[in-house]
Amino acid sequence: MIYTSAMVIRPTLLMQSWGFVLGSFLFALGSAPVVASMLGTTAANTSFFVGSWFFTAAAFIQLMLSGAATVDDKQGVGIRAEWLSAMIQFIGTLLFNVSTGAALHAHTVKGEMHLVWNPNLEGSLCFLASSALAVLLLLRAKSYWQPRSKNWLSVWLNMLGSIAFGVSAVGSFVLTDGNTLDPSLANYGTFVGALCFLLASAIFLGTGRTDSATLSPAS
């Protein structure tokens, strides 16, 4: 007689939250004032790279929890906004994987521009788009002011974090001499954004629900 067994891992909101919390912590660590300079460029970039993979894992879980991609109703087949927001965010995390990974190896201005800054900007734009969709979902549900709601807090914290990451991307623009446009703006934008993302996810820790929530390093 042959016995078979399978281990099934089911994604949960708690797993998603921890992924974003750990990823956000590593981004905050790599960009924190004073700490970042003590770590050095290589260590800071390594922190970003590892953190980006926690983001990606968490974003993938959120995508799985977001439900079906489409809905078929009386008006026809349409794409669900919650799923689209999660998908755009997931794509953004993949772009950050590319950007942070390339930062460890790029040694030319061209490489830093095309492999580091471009994916960084594109990933930040994805986070902004994902967060904007999440905000629209709140407004459509007439949830204009619900500061006691975890989901409401998470959505707006992620929106702030996405804006901060966008500001960071502008500050990290690579000039022709290889320097960045505004290193301080790039670091502070990343640090503030990471803290917002961390808080947006930390409020769900201790929750064992398997349903979806609008979280993100970015949305």
Image (cartoon, rainbow, N blue to C red):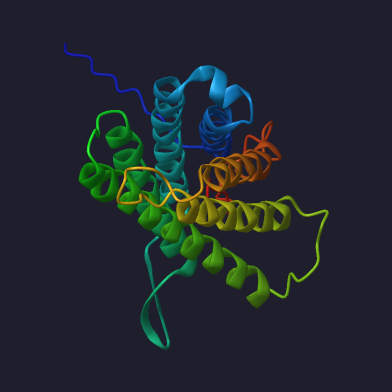
Snapshot quadrant of residue 126: bottom left
- Name the residue nearer the viewer: 155 or 108: 108
> Does residue 219 show up?
no
Q: Where is residue 190 in the image (x, y as percent from the top left)?
A: 55, 43
Question: Left or right: where does residue 208 sit relative to residue 146?
Answer: left
> Does residue 119 show up?
yes
Snapshot quadrant of residue 88: bottom left
For the point 65% across and 68% down, which residue is it?
Answer: 138
Q: In which quarter of the image is the C terminus?
A: bottom right
For the point 56% across and 31% down, which residue is it?
Answer: 18
Q: Eyeballing the image, is 188 above or below 39?
A: below
Q: In which quarter of the image is the N terminus?
A: top left
Q: Where is residue 146 in the image (x, y as percent from the top left)?
A: 80, 62
Q: Position of residue 31 (x, y in %)?
A: 55, 33
For the point 61% across and 31% down, which residue is it?
Answer: 32
- Name the residue nearer the viewer: 106 or 76: 106
Looking at the image, the residue that sits furthest to the front is: 177
- Name the residue nearer the viewer: 35 or 180: 180
For the point 80% across and 67% down, which residue is it?
Answer: 145
Snapshot quadrant of residue 83: bottom left
Question: Left or right: where does residue 142 sit relative to residue 163?
Answer: right
Q: Position of residue 127 (x, y in %)?
A: 47, 56
